[in-house]
């Protein structure tokens, strides 16, 4: 009698176990169906939620005029000039002095067969300056009438800046520099007026000199 009860009890526990497994599988199947085959009401709710997310304003898009700038360093300050005036950037090599010229005319360099005069803005703007090194480069600028190079302490690459971010120069940038500035930026870039530089007769090296 006792021997028959033991197998029956074990069989009962096994049956209960499989029933529990079936119920668990049924619950999982119901969840999968709800996830991949949602009810119409759930679909509408999800669509409304997605529409609300898409309706949120995105990051602001810059509008208006953009300034494409070549940046360089002079006397530990960052300067920029519009790339529409930049012909090329070359390392300072084989500089030849020009007799009887102002101190701010550093000399001339050979740029692809052209003799280009080099303007030392440190002297012209009355800034602190040090000697020349391997880091010095020349930014050659030009328009339809004039071409010369700007001596730089270091090239910093190019950037695009919305024109509306250009600010009025602060008081400490007044003096001779103020005549050649477009403005400054929040990052303390000093933006040069390329056209005004190229049209200034004081920066012209006459052929007869």
Image: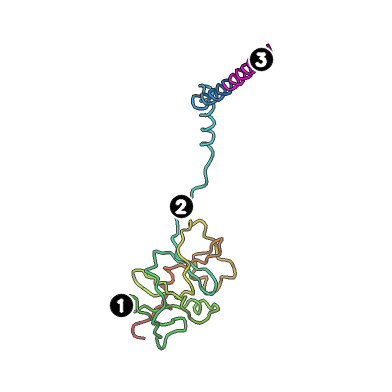
Q: Which residue is mark 1?
A: 113
Label 1 Cα neighbours within 10 Å, binned few <14 / some 14-19 / many ≥20: few
How far apart in space, not on screen, are marks 1 and 2 (Cα)? 39 Å
Residue mark closest to the camera, 1 vs 2:
1
Earlier residue among tags 1 and 2: 2
Is residue 32 placed above or below 67 in the rendered structure?
above
Q: Residue at x 48, y 58 (%)?
A: 161
Q: Residue furthest top?
A: 1
Which x, y percent locates residue 204? Answer: 39, 78
Kindly identify which numbered label has been placed on residue 91.
none
Do residues under tags 1 and 2 come within 8 Å of each other at their CB atoms?
no
Label 2 Cα neighbours within 10 Å, binned few <14 / some 14-19 / many ≥20: few
Q: Is residue 19 magenta?
A: yes
Label 3 Cα neighbours within 10 Å, binned few <14 / some 14-19 / many ≥20: few
Q: Residue at x 48, y 67 (%)?
A: 156
Disc 3, SS = helix
Disc 1, SS = loop
Q: Which residue is mark 3?
A: 3
Q: Which residue is mark 2?
A: 64
Disc 2, SS = loop
Q: Residue furthest right?
A: 2
Which x, y percent locates residue 24? Answer: 58, 23
Q: Quadrant of the N terminus?
A: top right
Residue numbers of the magenta segment = 1-21
Quarter of the rendering containing residue 148: bottom left
Do residues under tags 1 and 3 come within 8 Å of each other at their CB atoms?
no
């Amino acid at each position: 009698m006792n021997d028959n009860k033991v197998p029956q009890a074990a069989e009962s526990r096994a049956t209960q176990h499989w029933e529990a497994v079936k119920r668990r599988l049924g619950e999982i199947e119901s969840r999968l169906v709800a996830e991949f085959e949602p009810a119409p009401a759930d679909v509408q709710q999800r669509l409304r939620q997605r529409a609300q997310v898409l309706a949120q304003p995105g990051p602001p898009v810059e509008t208006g005029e953009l300034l494409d700038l070549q940046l360089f360093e002079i006397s530990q300050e960052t300067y920029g000039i519009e790339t529409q005036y930049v012909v090329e950037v070359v390392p300072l090599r084989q500089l030849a002095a020009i007799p009887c010229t102002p101190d701010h005319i550093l000399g001339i360099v050979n740029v692809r067969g052209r003799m280009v005069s080099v303007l030392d803005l440190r002297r012209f703007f009355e800034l602190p300056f040090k000697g020349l090194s391997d880091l010095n480069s020349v930014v050659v600028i030009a328009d339809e009438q004039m071409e010369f190079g700007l001596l730089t302490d270091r090239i910093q690459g190019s950037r695009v800046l919305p024109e509306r971010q250009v600010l009025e120069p602060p008081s400490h940038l007044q003096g001779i520099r103020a005549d050649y500035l477009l403005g400054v930026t929040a990052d303390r870039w000093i933006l040069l007026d390329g056209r005004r530089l190229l049209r200034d007769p004081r920066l012209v090296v006459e052929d007869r000199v």
